Amino acid sequence: MHKPTPPQRNSAEKEALLSNVALLYYGEGLTQGEIAKRMKVSRATIVNMLRESRDLGVVEIRVDGQFLTGSSLARELREKYGLADVYVAQPAAESVALSRDESLRQLARVAAMAVLDVVEPGDRCGVAWGETIMAVADAMPRNAVADVEVCQLIGSMISDRVPASENCTIQIAGKLGAQCFTLHAPGLISSVELARQICSEPTIHMQLERLKSLDMAIYSVGNVQAETHLVAAGMTSEAELAEAVAAGAAGILCCRYLSAEGAQIDLPPHDRLIAAEVADLRAARKKLLVVCGVDRAEATLACIRGGLATHLVVDKPLALALLEG
């Protein structure tokens, strides 16, 4: 009797997987055995994947002292902030300034492997919304993990920058071969009273209750500058944002304002949101925070201070800024 042939990966998925393995080996300094353990495959498989990544030109081996700083940066950040793990996305060449889009793509590839590293069989994972999390979802290779649930942290929203919020959840669930639970309501409601009524509906109430028992949460944090996605998506006004900043807001997490110490600030549009509360995220055992750009340094520090990060993925400029913070 012939064994069934495993599904073939398309070229983009294969390249993403090879890139992630190469990043762990050449960028993070993990051994082949450690990578094999993370990915739940044999060491021989990792050896073959690294060879293939070189043959296909996915990775180019060269001696460059700048690359050696990656592991030390991660280690220093772990020790400084007491984090479980840190992943630092390094530029291919220090002399070349990357655009935000290029930095985000590179960061997303590192974060995609971090997701596969941190998620465990049986986990219930919450997934947020935004351009950073969408980039992570796009970069993730298919790698099924048994008995995982993936839940949407923010109700349905759409903006010019990012597809509908459920897309992040659906795509990550698909990559993990997980059961997917979307939030069957808009992310922002027109009035406080209507928001309360919707939250009390049995189906929505059950979905929001599921977010109170997460094993893992995957999210980014935004700054409180005028161009923040919260304003761009029409979820708040510039006047409301200014009020929040005056009240001490340092970041925006799942569309909710955070103080510099990581406490939730209950200002509009807080009471019209259909989304996880900051306390729900803090209660998760594993909190994977993915952030791109030094302009989000204060927001990232707010998350760390508030116990909202156990695992951190950042680009090198932000990593250096956090070490100075």
Image: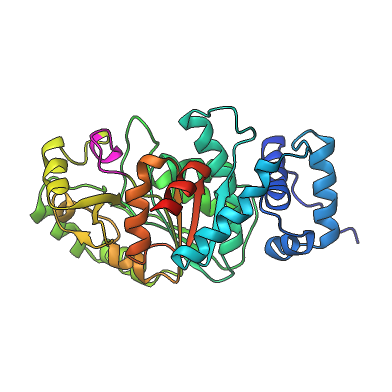
- Whether residue 259 is in magenta: the answer is no
Residue 158 place in picture, x, y as percent: 32, 37
Residue 305 in view of the camera: yes
Dominant SS in magenta:
loop
Residue located at (78% from left, 52% from top): 6
The residue nearer to you, when weighing 99 against 228, is 99
- Give percent across and percent down for residue 106: 57, 39
Count of numbered tags: 0
Does residue 251 appear to the left or right of 69 in the view shown?
Answer: left
- Residue 170 as seen in the image, left or right of residue 28: left
- Residue found at x 36% / y 55%: 301
Where residue 269 appears, as percent x and y from the top left, is: 16, 49
Q: Is residue 125 left or right of residue 304?
A: right
Please identify the quarter of the rendering in which residue 285 is found: bottom left
The magenta-colored residue range is 223-231
Report if residue 230 lies within the magenta region.
Answer: yes
Vertical position of residue 30 compared to residue 120: above or below: above
Residue 255 seen in the current view: no
